[in-house]
Amino acid sequence: MGAVRAVTVTLTSSQARPIIEVVPIPALTNEMGIFPAALAAFCDAYGGLELATLVTYDAGACSAQNAAEVRARGLHYLFGLKRHAGGRAPPPPCLPAPHAVSQRHPALERAPGRALEDAAR
């Protein structure tokens, strides 16, 4: 039996950080491919509760398509980026427009560095 891979949705605004949704990653895809389904599962289950306004994720989901999925639901995103072995970061594929990073999200104002820390987990 192989490893079971899953996307977990954690409510990081709570000190308890409960896992509130788990979406298995099928063998024929990866984090990037399952991200829209995981986002939809979260929004379908909890969207009416307005639990989140900021979606954070590591570099595994960083793409313009996934960023557009988040924005289409009226949410903000913070995706991590990884450096190449040469030490230079690639152009950010998850930013559809330069102005996307010019606005500060209230979660970043409340706890500078925390959202970045959460995205790395």
Image (cartoon, helix red, strand yellow):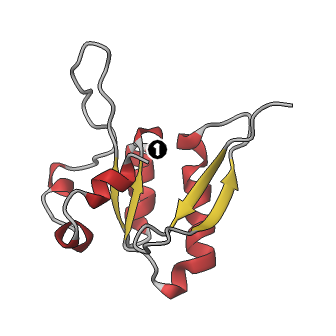
Pick whichever, 36 or 12, lies toward us. 12
Give me the residue at 21% from left, 73% from top.
110
Please tell me whether residue 26 is drawn above or below residue 14 in the rendered image: above
Give coordinates of residue 74: x percent, y percent. 38, 73
Spot the residue most to the right: 1
Report the residue marked by disc 1: 61
Say whether residue 107 is left or right of residue 10: left
Give residue 54's quadrant in the image.
bottom left
Give coordinates of residue 118: x percent, y percent. 37, 55
Give coordinates of residue 43: x percent, y percent. 55, 72
Spot the residue most to the top: 86
Please rate how many residues cluster around mark 1, counting C-alpha atoms within 10 Å: few if below 14, some from 14 to 19, many from 20. many
Give me the residue at 22% from left, 74% from top.
106
Give me the residue at 67% from left, 56% from top.
23
Task: Tell me the quadrant of the picture where the N terminus can be found.
Answer: top right
Give coordinates of residue 63: x percent, y percent. 40, 42
The three-letter code of the residue at mark 1 reads Ala
Q: Secondary structure at mark 1?
A: helix
Please tell me whether residue 66 is drawn above or below residue 33 in the rendered image: below
Say whether residue 100 is left or right of residue 52: left
Give residue 115's quadrant in the image.
bottom left
Total numbered badges shown on the rendered structure: 1
